[in-house]
């Protein structure tokens, strides 16, 4: 498994910086973002190659979230995400309706967005 700490060592930054870049919570310099993206890509593919696997022929890789890492990997990653606005809108509507007693009850399901990219081609190798 490749961890945040592994990527941080490879990129010459802290694990916190890697976390911030992946979550998009803080602006980081372009060189730092690029080193982190490169680290994720390099370490992930190295691990797969070490195990005799190739993306997407042997293994499909899907990123959770809309992060730029998915787009800029050496094999662009298919991603599954729910945009922040779509997550936030129902929450705000419930909070606004709560004081009036009109707050809807139950669970609201929000469909995720699938963005297919090159990392999820048909597998050709047998599962072992």
Image (spheres, rainbow, N blue to C red):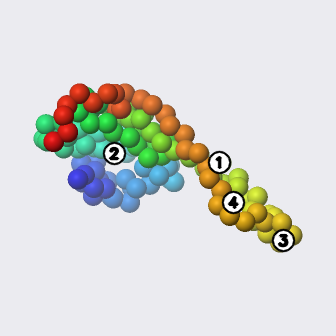
Q: Position of residue 70 (x, y in %)?
A: 41, 38
Checking the image for residue 36, the label placed there is 2
Around disc 4, counting alpha carbons within 10 Å, would you say few (fewer than 14), some (14 to 19), or many (20 or more)? few
Location of residue 90 (image quadrant): bottom right
Location of residue 124 (image quadrant): top left
Quadrant location of the C terminus in the rendered image: top left
Q: Is the residue under label 1 in contact with that under label 3 (CB below 8 Å)?
A: no
Query: Residues under labels 1 and 2: Cα distance?
Result: 28 Å
Q: Tell me what residue is drawn at x 59 percent, y 45 percent.
A: 111
Examine the rendered structure and indicate whether residue 56 appears above or below residue 110: above
Residue lying furthest right = 100
Q: Tell me what residue is drawn at x 23 percent, y 33 percent.
A: 58
Residue beneath disc 3: 101
Q: Is residue 83 left or right of residue 47?
A: right
Residue beneath disc 1: 86
**Circle nearer the N terminus (3, 4):** 4
Most foreground residue, 65 or 98: 98
Residue beneath disc 4: 91
Around disc 2, counting alpha carbons within 10 Å, would you say few (fewer than 14), some (14 to 19), or many (20 or more)? many
Residue 12 in view, yes or no: no
Q: Is residue 6 left or right of residue 24?
A: left
Q: Is the residue under label 2 in contact with that under label 1 (CB below 8 Å)?
A: no
Q: Tell me what residue is drawn at x 86 percent, y 70 percent.
A: 100
Q: Position of residue 78 (x, y in %)?
A: 41, 35
Query: Residues under labels 4 and 1: Cα distance?
Result: 9 Å
Most foreground residue, 7 or 52: 52
Element carrying mark 4: helix
Element carrying mark 2: helix
Most foreground residue, 82 or 70: 82
Q: Position of residue 85 (x, y in %)?
A: 65, 48
């Amino acid at each position: 498994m490749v961890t945040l700490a592994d990527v941080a060592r490879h990129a010459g930054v802290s694990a916190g910086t890697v976390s911030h870049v992946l979550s998009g919570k803080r602006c980081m310099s372009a060189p730092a973002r690029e080193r982190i993206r490169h680290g994720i890509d390099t370490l992930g593919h190295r691990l797969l190659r070490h195990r005799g696997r190739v993306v997407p022929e042997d293994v499909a890789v899907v990123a959770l979230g809309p992060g730029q890492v998915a787009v800029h990997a050496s094999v662009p990653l298919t991603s599954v995400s729910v945009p922040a606005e779509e997550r936030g809108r129902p929450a705000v509507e419930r909070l606004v309706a709560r004081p009036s007693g009109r707050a809807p009850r139950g669970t609201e399901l929000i469909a995720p967005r699938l963005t297919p990219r090159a990392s999820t081609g048909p597998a050709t190798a047998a599962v072992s």
